[in-house]
Amino acid sequence: MRWPRGKYNGRRIEGFKVSLHLHLLRWHLIPRWSVRTAEAYCIWLCWTVRAEASYR
């Protein structure tokens, strides 16, 4: 089995980082999902959850 590689930089993906952010001044009543080049995130109410690949 080969290690997965990044689509744009060709580097080996070692794992994923998941982070949770709390924004007290910015609220979104309708959930928003987005997937960018190397990062996926969801925003709902005052929370933001981000997931991105870790490269080596």
Image: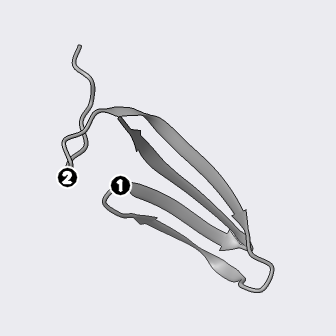
Q: Quadrant of the N terminus?
A: top left
* Residue at the front extreme of this rendering: 56
Residue 2 location in percent, x, y?
A: 22, 19
Residue topped by disc 1: 38
Q: Are marks 1 and 2 in contact (CB under 8 Å)?
A: yes
Residue 27, placed above or below residue 15: below
- Return the x and y of residue 3 as percentages of the image width and height: 27, 24
Q: Name the amino acid, label 1.
A: Ala
Circle nearer the N terminus (1, 2):
2
Q: Is residue 21 left or right of residue 32?
A: right
> Which residue lies at the image location 51% right of the left edge and 51% below the top edge?
51
Quarter of the image that includes the C terminus? top left
Asked if 36 appears above or below 29 in the picture, the reply is above
SS category of the residue bearing label 1 = loop
Helix, strand, or loop for circle 2?
A: loop
| Image coordinates for residue 16, horizontal then vertical, percent | 48, 39
Q: Quick one: which residue is furthest to the right in this view?
A: 24
Q: Residue at x 74, y 75 (%)?
A: 23
| The furthest residue to the bottom | 25
- Name which quarter of the figure residue 13 lies in: top left
- Is 31 in front, or is 43? 43
Callout 2: few (<14), some (14-19), or many (20+) C-alpha neighbours within 10 Å?
few
Name the mark on residue 8: 2
Residue drawn at (51%, 61%), measured in percent from left and top? 41
Residue 55 is left or right of residue 3, and the answer is right
Which amino acid, mark 2? Tyr
State the residue lying farthest toward the top. 1
Q: How far is mark 1 from mark 2, CA to CA?
A: 9 Å
**Crowding at mark 1 (Cα within 10 Å: few <14, some 14-19, many 20+):** few
Which quadrant of the structure image shows residue 38? Answer: bottom left
